[in-house]
Amino acid sequence: MNSIKVGDLSVNRLGFGAMRVCGPEIWGPPKDRPAALKVLRRAYELGCNFFDTADSYGPYVDEELIAEALHPYPKDLVIGTKGGLVRPSAPRWDTNGKPAHLRKAIEGSLKRLKVERIDLYQLHAADPEVPLEDSLGAIVEAQKAGKIRHIGVSNFDLKELARGRKVAKIVSVQNRYNLQDRSSDDVLAACEKDNLAFLPWYPLGAGNSLSLSRTKKLAKEKGATPAQIAIAWLLARSPAMLPIPGTSSIAHLEENVAAGNITLRAEELKALS
């Protein structure tokens, strides 16, 4: 599996999005905790040495599960978590970029993940009620205090990324991106230009990318599944890409990781586009 840099950290190009091991609607604990822990351990065994999580997943449950499954952590495991979204109830994802909240969120993630320093801490989304500079400023403070190694951002447009980079040394961007939704192409181009990692969330588009006739056709031709084609396309789309497909199923996990062995020719990429 090829590697990619997240700041000064080198990880394999297929990571694991841990969100799905929580309960339904990313709320509460998993129905089968031992099974969830097995998925997390298996992801690492298969070579996924970058895990993505957030304090809002559960909330809090996801970070606790990762620690339960893998702490003390293997030396090459890199964990990226996020703060800046809160969950008053299962359907809600509310922004909170207030510095006081982020300072508290960082402390909570440190405790739940059982680490002294978070490898990658991402602002989950810009809060329209709080200046972006204030939100990122709180994260920079924690970085200077040795609590965070690298800073990333999520759900940022190009203007927000430019603003954010004046405040913090940003090493990664995590935006929605898949075969059908390429609205972050300009952000991806900026990441390529400046050697930032681009983490596409919703890499399968809730299955929509898999139902495309061109995806299904190519999958049949290559003896692969539509999900594998969608992931292989992301890997081929840009050297900055670090896909983080997630699942609560070991079978789906193994299928997703196998997508890293699929090579798409130029004409196949053109057909998908």
Image (cartoon, rainbow, N blue to C red):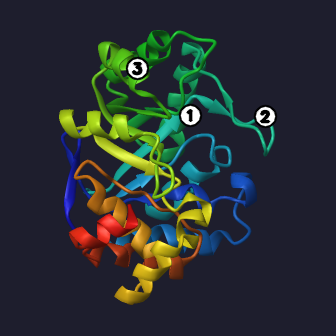
- Residue topped by disc 2: 88
In depth, the one of 201 and 230 nearer the eye is: 230
Drawn side of residue 39 relative to residue 258, left or right: right
- Residue topped by disc 3: 159
Sequence order check, earlier mark of 2 and 1 = 2
Drawn side of residue 129 relative to residue 196, left or right: right
- Residue 31 sits in quarter: bottom right
- Residue topped by disc 1: 108
Q: Is residue 53 above or below residue 35?
A: above
User: Residue 155's x, y, as percent?
Assistant: 50, 34
Name which residue lies at 32% across and 56% down: 77
**Label 3 element class:** helix
- Residue 7 sits in quarter: top left
**Label 2 element class:** loop
Viewer-side label of 3, 1: 3
**Label 3 Cα crowd, 10 Å radius (few <14 / some 14-19 / many 20+):** few
Task: Please state, as top left, top right, bottom left or bottom right, where the N terminus lies in the image.
Answer: bottom left
Task: Please state, as top left, top right, bottom left or bottom right, where the C terminus lies in the image.
Answer: bottom left
Kindly report the distance in space between the C-alpha atoms of the residues bearing marks 3 and 1.
30 Å
Q: Is residue 237 above or below residue 259?
A: above
- Amino acid carrying label 2: it is Pro
Kindly report the distance in space between the C-alpha atoms of the residues bearing marks 2 and 1.
17 Å
Drawn side of residue 156 relative to residue 101, left or right: left
* Residue 117 seen: no
Sequence order check, earlier mark of 2 and 3 = 2
Name which residue lies at 63% across and 41% down: 56
- Residue 47 sits in quarter: bottom left
**Label 2 Cα crowd, 10 Å radius (few <14 / some 14-19 / many 20+):** few
Viewer-side label of 2, 3: 3
User: Residue 112's x, y, as percent?
Assistant: 54, 44
- Amino acid carrying label 3: it is Lys
- Amino acid carrying label 1: it is Gly
